[in-house]
Image (cartoon, grey):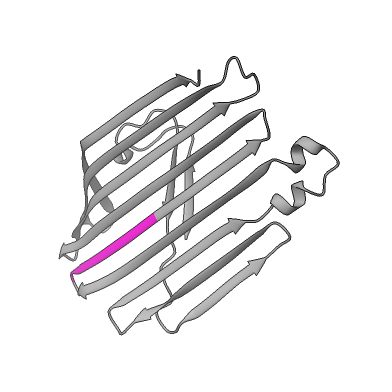
Amino acid sequence: GDVTLYKSGIPAYYGGRILSVMDIKLKEGNKEKLKVSGGLSPVSGRLMIEGPVKDKATYILSARSTYSDWLLKQLKDKQLQKSTAGFFDIQGMANIEVDTNNKISISGYLSRDKFNYYKESAFNYSNLAATIQWNHIFKPNLFADFSAILSNYDYQINNVQDSTAMSSMYYRLNQNIARADFTWFPAEKQKINRSEERRVGKECRSRWSPYH
């Protein structure tokens, strides 16, 4: 994979973003053989599986999780002993070469984090993202990427410290995006990019609720 961070001077290619952009290009699966790797630590574990599907497709699937509650129970603070913390994330990608001029990529990401500070506060948040992309070569100097993107984010914070003022705050942001990116090389040292993006659905919802 490859990561590029733009903090200023963001190219117009990214649709007029004004804060910052992190461009992440995911690693593709192993094209030659099945490969399994992973690791364990006292508080977390990870696993990655990748490989080919015949001669036309590859896949990669990775997951991470924590099991740190046992560590909290070793602390002297009684409140921390009864608290819980954890996260997990799962990421996957499949690439299919339809023919020499067409390629389809499907990727997805799911994560969830939570922390419960016993009789004080608790929060949890999650991310869900999925993309299907079609890469088409019109001719050697002109090609395009057509993408459908799903993005969901939500979090919840619960205040349980004071029994007379218990409350819960919830926020959700969902959006669906259709995008087309064209790249044209009119001459050997010239390159022209053209992008079109449309949000075909967006939901922003928040809620604050007292418990009593």
Q: Is residue 72 above or below residue 200?
A: below
**Does residue 114 appear to the left or right of 103 in the view shown?**
right
* Nearest the eye: 102 or 182: 102
Residue drawn at point x = 34 percent, y = 43 percent: 151
**Does residue 72 appear to the left or right of 185 in the view shown?**
right
**Does residue 193 appear to the left or right of 29 in the view shown?**
left
User: Is 74 part of what is drawn in magenta?
Assistant: no
Q: Locate residue 128, reporting x and y percent.
A: 39, 47
| Image quarter of residue 99 | bottom left
Q: Is residue 75 above or below residue 54?
A: above
Residue drawn at point x = 73 percent, y = 53 percent: 70
* Nearest the eye: 1 or 199: 199
* Nearest the eye: 99 or 142: 99
Residue drawn at point x = 30 percent, y = 41 percent: 13
**Does residue 15 appear to the left or right of 170 in the view shown?**
left
Q: Locate residue 54, reporting x and y percent.
A: 31, 85
The residues colored magenta run 101-108
| Image quarter of residue 127 | top left
Q: Locate residue 42, reporting x and y percent.
A: 73, 60
| Callout count | 0
Extreme-left residue of the structure: 138
Residue drawn at point x = 67 percent, y = 30 percent: 119
Q: Is residue 12 above or below residue 204?
A: below
Q: What's the magenta bit mostly, secondary-structure-wise?
A: strand
Q: Locate residue 109, reporting x and y percent.
A: 41, 54
